[in-house]
Each structure stands twice: as C-alpha cells, then as structure tokens.
Image (spheres, helix red, strand yellow):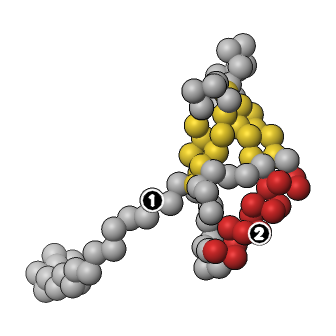
Amino acid sequence: MADMIGGFYPKQRHENAPTWVIGKASINIAQFRDWMGAYIKQNPNEEWLNMELLVAKSGKGYAKVDDWKPEQKNTPPQPVSEDIPF
C-alpha cells in the first residue's frame, strides 16, 4: 500500500485566517473509506493512525502515513535504592 492517505486532502492556512486556525482539510468519504479499510486489514492491531500533512511541488496538499515508532529498548529495570530519605 502506498503511504499516501487516500481521500484526505489538507489545505494550508489562509493568510487572513485567525492565528488559532492551523489549516483545513477535506475528506472524500468514499475514497477515504476504501483506503481506511485496506489500511485496517494490513494493520489490524493499530490503535492510531499518525499522518504528516505535506505540500507537493504543485502546491497541493496531501497526507502521508507517519509510521515512525520509537525504538524498543530491552534494558533491565534499575534496582531501587534502599536509601530513601522518607
């Protein structure tokens, strides 16, 4: 599956928008439903969908799956000190 999110179209903040407005987005429900169904089949245990909102060279906005995950570290737990002052 391509990492572009189908049916989700972000738009940049309008220059006259208030400062609390980040931007806008449109969702084509049929396209997004199809894309999301395929995503869920390929990622059945995911609870979140993180995305990056980007701008193409053409100036159009698009969304892409952000699949970064923190590195799993297998470090043993640190021993608890018995010198607790309380």
Cα distance in 3D space between marks 2 and 1: 21 Å
Residue marked by disc 1 = 68
Let me know if residue 80 appears in the view: no
Q: Nearer the viewer, mark 2 or mark 1?
A: 2
Say which residue appears at 80% left-offset and 40% top-offset: 26
Question: In the rendering, which numbered label is found on residue 84?
Answer: none
Give the percent coordinates (x, y) of residue 57: 57, 27
Q: Is residue 29 above or below residue 61?
A: below
Towards the viewer: 69 or 80: 69
Horizontal and vertical percent for residue 11? 71, 31
Q: Amino acid at mark 2?
A: Gly
What amino acid type is highlighted by mark number 1? Trp
Can residue 61 be seen here? The reply is: yes
Expressed as whole percent of the image width and height from the top left, the position of residue 74 reads: 26, 81
Residue at x-position 74% and y-position 40%? 9
Quarter assignment of residue 55: top right
As drawn, 57 above or below 77: above
Farthest residue to the top: give it. 16
Give the quadrant of the C terminus.
bottom left
| Badge 1: residue crowd in 10 Å (few <14, some 14–19, many ≥20) | few
Tell me the element at label 1: loop
Count of number-bearing discs: 2
Residue 37, disc: 2
- Quadrant where the N terminus sits is bottom right
Q: Quadrant of residue 14?
A: top right
Residue nearer the viewer, 20 or 59: 59
Residue at image position (63%, 25%) is 58
**Among numbered discs 2 and 1, the one appearing first in the sequence:** 2
Drawn side of residue 29 relative to residue 17, left or right = right
